[in-house]
Image (cartoon, rainbow, N blue to C red):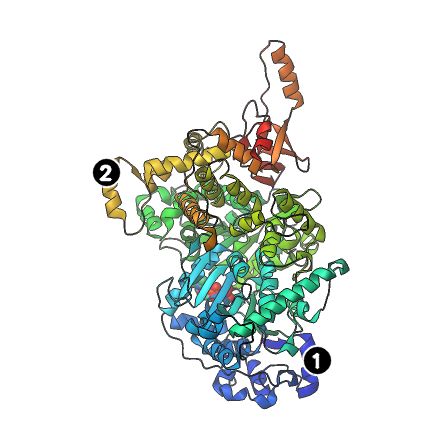
Amino acid sequence: PELSTTKSKKKKRKRKRSSGSGIDKPGGDDEAKALFHDEDHPGGEIPRKKSWEEHGPKSASPSSQHPEDVGKQHVTISMPPLAGMFVKERSNLPVYRHRKELCHLIANNDVVLVVAETGSGKSTQIPAYISESSLLKKAATLSAKSTPTPSSTTTKTTTKSKTPHQKYGLTISVTQPRRVAAITLAKRVSDELGCLPGTLVGHRVRFDDTTDLRGTITKIIYATDGMLLREAMVDPLLRRYGVVVLDEAHERSLQTDVLFGVVKRAMCARRRDEKNDDGCRWVNGEMDGVAMDTAPSLEKDVEIINKMRQEAVNLGIPPLRVVVMSATLDVETFQRFFPGSATVKIPGRQFPVQEVYTEEVQEDYLDAALKTAIQIHKYTDDGDVLIFLPGQDEIEDLASLLKTHLEELEPDNTPSTQQGVTKDIVQNIKGIGTSVHSGNTMIVNGVLICVLYAALPPDAQMVAFRPKPEGCSRKIILSTNIAETSVTLDGIKYVVDCGKHKSREYSSSTGMESLKLSNISKAQAAQRMGRAGRVSEGICLRLYPEIAFDSLEETTIPEILRVNLAHVVLQLKAMGIHDPRCFSFLTPPDPDNIVKSFELLSALGAVDESLELTAYGKEMSKLPLDPVFAHLLLQSEKFECVSEMLTVVGMLSAENIFFRPGRSGEDSGGLASVGAAAHRRFASHEGDLPSLLNVYNAWKKEAIYLQPGKSKKLEKKKLSSGKMLHGDWCKQNFISGRALVRAHDVRSQLSELASRSVERNGLGMNVDSSCAAEMTTFFKCISGGLSLQVASRVPTPEQQQGSRLSKAGKSGFIPSRGQYKTRLGGNFVSVHPTSFMFGRNPPPKCVVYTELLQTSKLYIRGVTQIREEWIDEGR
Ligand code: CDP
């Protein structure tokens, strides 16, 4: 492992010429030597040469500056010792030894790329270091000093009053692709800094914001990348922030990729030294990768960015610092995108991991994973096991198979979940109460089986992170690729990798998006393997032959190249970007995909013929929803069913409302059929959307949702009203309480946004309008709102035969699951087995759907029966 700090190529060449030292390090050669101090001793405990920290800030002598940096103020940073809780744990993390160097680099470079192993402390520590250091304060004072005399264009407010950043100081934004990571990191960092969550450190994810809105208190915000993007729609300069940290950059999630361009734009506009504009092609007119026919658009964008720059100057907004962090970063791509950026590689603590392959291709990877896990448990004494599987279904299936097999392994011991003493252990694991509803976290013969996937509530996920409870000899974690990089799991000795994952894919020719089971990349395989070597030597068992590994792609294809871009295009348009085709994307998407997105937006009425955002499109962009659902909600006003549509959209936003314990009745002791029967009580004949409505309404009517601090009052109310407690109700009905509460929260927030006045950036809708008395309008509304997602029944030969038979007056109609053809794209699809419409006999003629899903075959989900004539009526 090596620690290196380099500038990207362009600057590196120049620097070498000027210093002759061969070491390329902003801030001085002394420092550069110090930064290499521990190359041979990654463990950190071995005596080492003096670090930069010990040399002190003097070493950042201006005389050793790069000529390009002369004139640029070099900032020296002071750093107090760690305080608060967990000082020992924090100072043991690999990033700790580099904290001053990191802050120094961030203070003196527009962009710093940080590459360090998962668990080395990037996400929790680096934002805290920035906050603990004098970095932000310095940035704010520097800006105040260098603020030029306001030009004639300066508004009255800016000359007279201080801007928020001058009044309250600057904030750090740390973005995460996953909401669970944002929430848990904010909590962890609050604990470490000894403050209450939502004060100094808060999280901001869709429909859940614990930060103070004015920016007076919260100084570190862990947000999903989508949330920062929404903020950029209102404030493209991101003026509240002094540093934006883009975490998990290697994941190349759609929103993170867009954010790279948006943040780069803000950074360029906030730069003071115009000479240093090489990273911003809007300003210097560089046109790498931009089609010539977009040149006029480019000029328009230059105009826009110049306006932003003027505004930044007038308001005295300090430069924006950007930190890009990852466990496995494709450094070259990022250095090309952010020329002049500095790179820091921090070695982690990694023990050797042996790679083992199967001899033959395993068609049934679930069975192979099961056998491997059982063998590990049978033939080794200790060490936790992490099994990577593609999705929640496979995870839950394997969990129940494992349970059965582990029980059989030692027939003397009945499963601990059924024994008094071990049941206590189960209940002692904090959060297990919620994990029970996932159905599969259990202790069987001393083995704790945990599941881990993004849709699982944070508390239930926590079981996998906690130490094993007493009496457990081994932990087996079944996880999606969430455990590849975004979470830290200690104690894993065996990794079992099925080599597959599920990813969204979009075809711009059909306009169709699907969830596909596909092979992982070599980079992902390496990350998975790395999970095994954190605490001791490990073994990675790949459930595929070596030759299959060799044929894997080197890196994962960025999401932006795989998904529908309608939402992104709408967001970019709302941010004032004239032509998204010449937006600075880290990897430009297929222009055809952007054109297709414009077609969809145009069909929804969001853009006009000249592709400018219409007033309706502006309204749509205010809703944090996919354009189709935003359209559905906006349409509901016309049909006076806003209340119902808010519920439906809220329920659709919360994944996995229905708890399906195992898939076979046998495995789950009959629970699966009990659960299915419970769910059928909510089923509407018309299909899934009205069924969701039924669940929500029944819950509201029959259950009390206990809010913190209100329990006693409501307990009393329960007694008098005859309502059940929320938890009991959910358990009885096999409904995920968490998901329901989330749906309720989403609904409340959408409702707030929809009812807020237009002047206050809301939509001014009447959110109480309801069609409960006449549901036809609701169906008309969804027919029109989802008119681009209509499928018509294709009679199967059996049905044709059946109808001939019935016409002939004979019985013998052969039931069919119904084969449908989508209107858009003409794809043949089937109703997904989780839909209430599955197996409906006879299948309805015409349906709308909310999701198209490709697994073993092409499925539709969120299926609702409509009448064809309603499609036009509803438009
Ligand atoms: O970002 P990176 O993977 O480099 O590390 P991190 O997330 O900052 O984690 C550093 C340490 O903090 C790990 O050893 C975790 O055990 C701990 N941590 C935690 O206890 N709770 C969290 N929510 C996140 C991290």
Q: Is residue 87 left or right of residue 523?
A: left
Q: Quadrant of the N terminus?
A: bottom right
State whether residue 115 appears in this view: no
Q: Which mark is residue 719?
A: 2
Mark 1 closeness class: few <14, some 14–19, many ≥20 residues within 10 Å: few
Whole-percent x, y for residue 513 in the image: 63, 44
- Nearest to the observer: residue 673 or residue 814: 814
Residue at the spot 60% in from the left edge and 13% down from the top edge: 806
Q: Is residue 608 above or below residue 86?
A: above
In the image as oriented, which residue stretches furthest toward the right? 292
The disc labelled 2 sits on which kind of residue? Leu
- Mark 2–mark 1 CB contact (< 8 Å): no
Q: In this view, does 785 lie above or below 269?
A: above
Mark closest to the chain's N terminus, 2 or 1: 1
Whole-percent x, y for residue 724 in the image: 30, 38
Whole-percent x, y for residue 87 in the image: 39, 73
Q: What element carries label 2?
A: helix
Residue at the spot 59% in from the left edge and 71% down from the top edge: 309
Q: Residue 95 carries which label?
A: none
Q: Distance between the residues labelled 2 and 1?
A: 77 Å
Q: In this view, does 261 lie to the left or right of 637?
A: right
Mark 2 closeness class: few <14, some 14–19, many ≥20 residues within 10 Å: few
Locate residue 11: give its quadrant.
bottom right
- Nearest to the observer: residue 653 or residue 817: 653
In the image as oriented, which residue stretches furthest toward the bottom? 63
Whole-percent x, y for residue 805 in the image: 63, 13
The disc labelled 1 sits on which kind of residue? Arg
Q: Mark 1 points at which residue?
A: 13
Which mark is nearer the camera, 2 or 1?
Answer: 2
